[in-house]
Image (cartoon, rainbow, N blue to C red):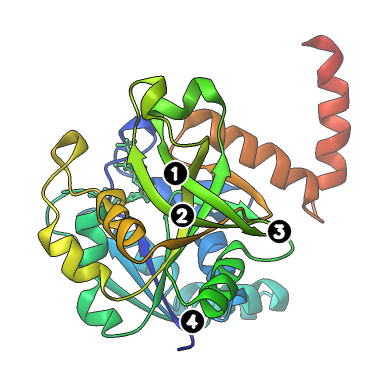
Amino acid sequence: MKVTKAVIPAAGLGTRVLPASKSLPKEMLTIVDKPAIQYIVEEAVNSGITDILIITNRGKGIIEDHFDRSPELEQRLLASGKKEMYDEVVSISKLANIFFIRQKETKGLGHAVNCARSFVGNEPFAVLYGDDVIIGDDPACGQLIRAYEKYGKSAVGIKAVPETDIHKYSSLKVEPLEDRLFLCTDMIEKPQTKEEVLSLYSILGRCVLTPDIFDILDQTPPGAGGEIQLTDAMRTLARTVGMTGVDYTGKRYDMGDKLGILQATVEIALKNPTVGDAFRDYLKELAPTL
Ligand code: UTP
């Protein structure tokens, strides 16, 4: 079945990027000239997704405003002859069919994904974590969709993390299938001892799930931090039918982390056609003084 629906969970509290995220959702933090979540929606659209559900919560109404029309602003841009910017602003509201639902209590990523049940129905769907921006020529979400289409199993985006950091992430049991693709048969969230580590591969940022995940989520008790963890439900899928791990190409930026935000800003600014060259000159000037 073709994957045309995506879910973007964006209802976390963003405590690691406070105070920036106190009233501004971290998903709306700017990278150069666009909010992070726009990069994520564009990746989904470039992967063939047509319908997107964004999971929000109280205080995140500006995400809805960003993907809506803005008649006053549009009129002003047209009247002042700024046709290119007018086209860009209007195109944001036409990227995809975008829907919103509120996660009424912050009970974890698994709980947030479970809010998408009636939107998803009985189809496979992509999940793009609202604070993970991935930049690359071949959209990461599309790479996972291709793996799902080929192997018929839920697919998870994976990356190797440093051994010293694996205790902060999930650790997956994997067997190679082909270039960049693995069969994943087990996982553990935040392994605390060396013996618990299954590999240095961890799930990062993206997955394509089959709809049976919802029944599993219904049965999943709160895990780490008292929250319903998506990885706990994925472990059931991995152990029973297996999942396909995709070591996707593209660079991931963690917008839920202060250093990640800075890295995204610098690297994406360097590629920007308008400010890239001037920014490179500025960095060259600055670097010798560091
Ligand atoms: P994170 O655990 O990185 O987000 O969840 P968080 O809870 O905002 O982070 P900190 O630790 O407090 O800084 C990954 C994604 O899942 C969403 C977040 O918005 C983020 O995009 N999420 C998390 C929800 O939608 N609901 C939740 O209950 C938790």
User: Counting other residues with Cα less than 10 Å from the Cα at mark 2, is it few (<14), some (14-19), or many (20 or more)?
Assistant: many
Please tell me the numbered disc located at residue 96. Answer: 4
Q: Give the Cα separation between the discs numbered 3 and 1.
A: 17 Å
- Earlier along the polypeptide chain: callout 4 or callout 1? 4
Please tell me the numbered disc located at residue 172. Answer: 1
Residue 100, position as x, y percentages in the image: 29, 72
Residue 232, position as x, y percentages in the image: 25, 49
Q: Give the Cα separation between the discs numbered 3 and 2.
A: 14 Å
Residue found 18% across the figure and 49% down from its top: 228
Q: At numbered mark 3, what does the secondary structure look like: helix, strand or loop?
A: loop
- Earlier along the polypeptide chain: callout 3 or callout 2? 3
User: Which quadrant would the C terminus be assigned to in this image?
Assistant: top right
Contact? badges 2 and 1 (CB < 8 Å): yes
In this view, 268 is above or below 102: above
User: Counting other residues with Cα less than 10 Å from the Cα at mark 4, is it few (<14), some (14-19), or many (20 or more)?
Assistant: some
Q: Residue furthest bottom?
A: 1
Q: Specify whether tag 3 is near ligand 1 (CB below 8 Å).
A: no
Q: Give the Cα separation between the discs numbered 2 and 1.
A: 7 Å
- Earlier along the polypeptide chain: callout 3 or callout 1? 1
User: Counting other residues with Cα less than 10 Å from the Cα at mark 1, is it few (<14), some (14-19), or many (20 or more)?
Assistant: many
Q: Give the Cα separation between the discs numbered 4 and 1.
A: 33 Å
Residue found 86% across the figure and 13% down from its top: 288
Q: At numbered mark 1, what does the secondary structure look like: helix, strand or loop?
A: strand
Please tell me the numbered disc located at residue 179. Answer: 3
Q: Amino acid at mark 4?
A: Ala
249 left or right of 174 in image: right
Disc tally is 4
Q: At numbered mark 4, what does the secondary structure look like: helix, strand or loop?
A: loop
Pick the residue in front: 109 or 164. 164
Q: Amino acid at mark 2?
A: Cys
**Front tag of 2 and 4:** 2
Q: Amino acid at mark 3?
A: Asp
